[in-house]
Amino acid sequence: MSEINLKEVLDYVQEHIPITVHLGAAIPRYDGSSLTVTAPLAENLNHRQSAFGGSLSAIAILSGWALLFVKLRELGIRSRLVIQKTEFDFLAPVTDDFESLSRLPTEQKYDRFIKMLTTKGRARLVVESEVTCDGQLCGTHKGTFVAVLLTDH
């Protein structure tokens, strides 16, 4: 298991998912089972002076994706990781800088995901996230992510 450098993860994300630069995304926290992505309101404003719904959804997807990306990297598993399905519930307007916290599902579900990926070469996992602003829950996200094992050629 290798040590994770969040700056390197953010550099990778910004290089391979260029919209994250425009969204102002940052990855300040990872604790082994959850990961936080933050974004400033200024880069994500809509016509109502609150955060654009598409930005909120993108940051929530990114936090789930980045959590799995980091977990797979820790295990030394090379895979192609994509979002398959996304659901976002908007609960309150976001009127300041915001963050999305993604958490791994139960250990049993996560272990089954890893086992399926390493034995079958493909697996999916649902990751849930909460988008908050000033300590208030403003949205919830449920994303189904698919990982496909990469083989060296």
Image (cartoon, rainbow, N blue to C red):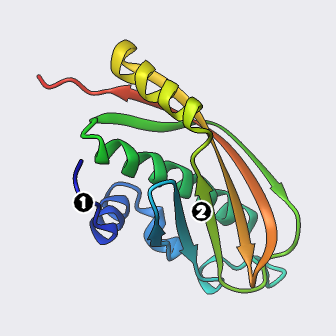
Residue 96's disc number: none
Point out residue 15 in the picture as x, y percentages from the top left corner. 31, 61
Considering every residue shown, the one lying at the far right of the view is: 91
Considering every residue shown, the one lying at the far left of the view is: 153
Residue occupying image coordinates x 48% and y 30%: 111
- Amino acid at the residue labelled 1: Glu
Left/right of residue 134 with respect to residue 101 in the rendered view: right
Residue occupying image coordinates x 48% and y 23%: 123
153 and 136: which is toward the camera = 136
Instruction: Note whether 90 is above or below 25 in the view shown.
Output: above
- The answer to which quarter of the image holds residue 134 is bottom right
Query: What is the secondary structure assignment of the residue under circle 1?
Result: loop
Instruction: Note whether 120 is above or below 10 in the view shown.
Output: above
For the C terminus, the quadrant is top left
Residue under circle 2? 59
Residue 3's disc number: 1
111 and 124: which is toward the camera = 111
Left/right of residue 124 with respect to residue 120 in the rendered view: right
